[in-house]
Image (cartoon, rainbow, N blue to C red):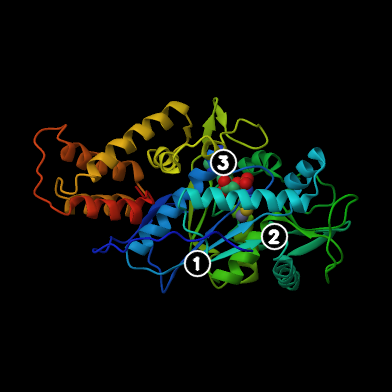
Amino acid sequence: MRAWPAPEVPQLPVTGPPVALFDTATGAKVTTAPDGPARLYVCGITPYDATHMGHAATYVAFDLLNRAWRNAGHEVVFVENVTDVDDPLLERATKVNVDWTELAERETELFRQDMQALRVLPPDHFIGAVESIPLAVGLIERLQESGSVYRVDDDLYFSVTADPAFGQESGFDRDAMLEIYPERGGDPERPGKKDPLDCVVWRGPRDGEPHWDSPLGPGRPGWHIECAAIAREHLGVAFDVQGGGSDLVFPHHEMCAGHAQVADPSGPFAKVYSHAGMVAYDGEKMSKSKGNLVFVSALRNSDVDPMAIRLVLLRHHFRSDWEWLDSDLWDAVDTLADWRRALSLGAGAPAGPVVTEVLAALADDLDAPRAVAAVQAWVDATLGTTGLADTSDEDAALTIHALLDAALGLAL
Ligand code: 5CA
Ligand code: ZN
């Protein structure tokens, strides 16, 4: 499907360092070393409601990775899916009595506008679950050939034991998996399964649900096979980074890895699994099912500067869990007013060390709070609030302006 228009990104005069990321699978920081273009897959939205701050935080985090790679001199191939057919979308469509395809199209369009406003670079391939059904069917057929798929009534299940590396992505032990599985769309109690952790890859037709004809029989793909199939098709084996929120560590990314690794055991699904922390509101994880939401579009409709929203997100390390506070938004608005004032002076404190520090911070597991602090120190020095400003750099504002845009996605 169509993505959203790409913003202009300035080219920086210096090259940033190699990008390191914390990897969920190994529990260690790993320096990414793309072999050719850097290959990134980020799990996209299930479009049944508007983009909330949790989604925005996750997509801005991986946008920082995209930018850090580009600033380090890499080309990037970025793929993102849209889960435009799945249980929560169908349930919501039924509840509000709207055609599920209309709901999905409407919310996907709103997401595009939100991402554009936040200056998130668009994916090169923005792929819907429905349009990728042939890919999912192809992958399931390959899994059938390897003997890792079995039938329960009209549904097809994947045997998790077929992947010797099953469990390595999340690092969860079996008890932890069994506890969390039913909370995240799993069906451990379904009679007829060989292992309670096995997951559905093809769901036979149900009354009132859409289904498609296929060589597997009529039905629709499971959630995990969707991302595994799209990522394999567009990024191949052992791509650089699989990204998403930490609520996807298990089962989603574990199952995706399982499907892909059984289909092609020549390498891991992804080299690094990177996960963003959860954003809370009113003391609980912000989620469509709980309804404790702050929407990007609602703030945009109230004339809030999207760059202020982006700055609030950047002030939290992407891997930490944090709570959205409305007061932080107004702080960010004030901060941006200071930053714009400093940039309007033209000359300012030396910009070179700020460029080095911001690129180094972002290349070190996307440490945006450290990058923001470096910019703030430059603004303070330039505005003379911390001691004497050294206004020896005539082009400081131009340099910082380009840096903010290229590295942090803040166009001021
Ligand atoms: N369509 C699937 C992924 S294939 C899905 O999880 N969709 S979603 O709409 O529920 O979430 C979209 C992305 O936002 C996922 O990466 C998810 O991990 C992330 N996300 C959801 N809620 C939050 C939150 N409260 N804080 C941070 N990230 C979140
Ligand atoms: Zn996914």
Residue 66 got which mark? none
> Which is nearer the N-term, disc 2 or disc 1?
2
Q: Quadrant of the N terminus?
A: bottom right
Residue in the foreground of this view, choosing between 327 and 29: 327
User: Which percent across, then down, holds residue 23?
Assistant: 44, 53
Task: Give ligand 1's quarter of the image.
Answer: top right
> Which is nearer the N-term, disc 3 or disc 1?
1
- Residue denoted by label 3: 297
Q: Quadrant of residue 222?
A: bottom right
Is the residue marked by circle 3 packed among few (<14), some (14-19), or many (20+) residues within 10 Å?
A: many
Tell me the CA gap for discs 3 and 1: 33 Å
- Residue denoted by label 2: 129
User: Which percent across, then down, holds residue 138?
Assistant: 72, 72
Q: Name the element at disc 1.
A: strand
Residue 239 got which mark? 1
User: Which percent across, then down, holds residue 319?
Assistant: 44, 43
Residue at the right extreme? 207
How many numbered circles are shown? 3
Q: Name the element at disc 2.
A: loop
Residue 390 visible in the shown view: yes
Q: Name the element at disc 3.
A: helix
Closest to the camera, between mark 2 and mark 1, is 2
Tell me the CA gap for discs 2 and 1: 20 Å
